[in-house]
Image (cartoon, rainbow, N blue to C red):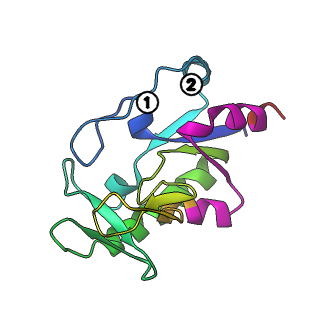
Amino acid sequence: MKRKILISACLIGENVKYDGGNNALHVTILEQWKQEGLLVPLCPEVLGGLSVPRFPCEVVVGENRVVNTIGTDVTDAFVKGAKESLRIAKEEGICMAILKARSPSCGKDIIYDGTFTSTRVNDSGMTCKLLQRSGIAVFSEEELEDAQHFWSK
């Protein structure tokens, strides 16, 4: 099976962000990987059943749950999206993921603390953690050089 790269759909221009927009990156290496058919885009939050647009969400630090700005607990959707992302990753032969920094699903190493005050904490999003525990190398879009080096090994 051909190795493939999981990527947050918002990073390649799909309008799946909470506000209905995207975080499109126009980077040569991503364009190359896309043309080679290596990218498998997905949005864990959409896979978990959340709508586009949706209320912004954050992981509540120390509680391993996710809430949105109106106080609704959406943890179940995040867990479902993470599990579905892992299922797809296994099915597609994913060995590396490039995920959206600071996202409550995809954030790697730094996410917001659940207070909706732009306070950052050292933690990762639910999907990121599950992929890493399953042996998939995860990089944020801010680590594309590292991702490219990993991929070329």
What amino acid is at disc 1? Ile
What amino acid is at disc 2? Leu
CB-based contact (under 8 Å), mark 2 and mark 1? yes
108 or 128, nearer to the observer = 108
- Coordinates of residue 17 in the picture (x, y in percent): 30, 44
- Coordinates of residue 119 in the picture (x, y in percent): 38, 61
- Coordinates of residue 5 in the picture (x, y in percent): 62, 39
Q: Is residue 98 above or below residue 37?
A: below
Q: Quadrant of residue 139?
A: top right
Q: Is residue 60 above or below residue 150?
A: below
Quarter of the image with the N terminus is top right
Quarter of the image with the C terminus is top right
Alpha-carbon neighbours of circle 1 within 10 Å: few (<14), some, or many (≥20)? many
Give SS at disc 2. helix
Q: Residue at x 42, y 39 (%)?
A: 9
Q: Is residue 120 left or right of residue 151?
A: left
Q: Which mark is residue 30?
A: 2
Q: Residue at x 44, y 78 (%)?
A: 64
Q: Say if the magenta span includes residue 7.
A: no
Residue underneath mark 1 = 12
Q: Residue furthest left?
A: 70
Q: Residue furthest bottom?
A: 63
The dominant secondary structure in magenta is helix
Q: Residue at x 66, y 67 (%)?
A: 133
Q: Which residues are magenta?
A: 129-150
- Coordinates of residue 63 in the picture (x, y in percent): 42, 82
Q: Is residue 112 left or right of residue 74?
A: right
Q: Quadrant of residue 132?
A: bottom right
33 or 11, nearer to the observer = 11
Q: Say if the magenta span includes residue 143.
A: yes
Q: Is residue 24 above or below residue 47?
A: above
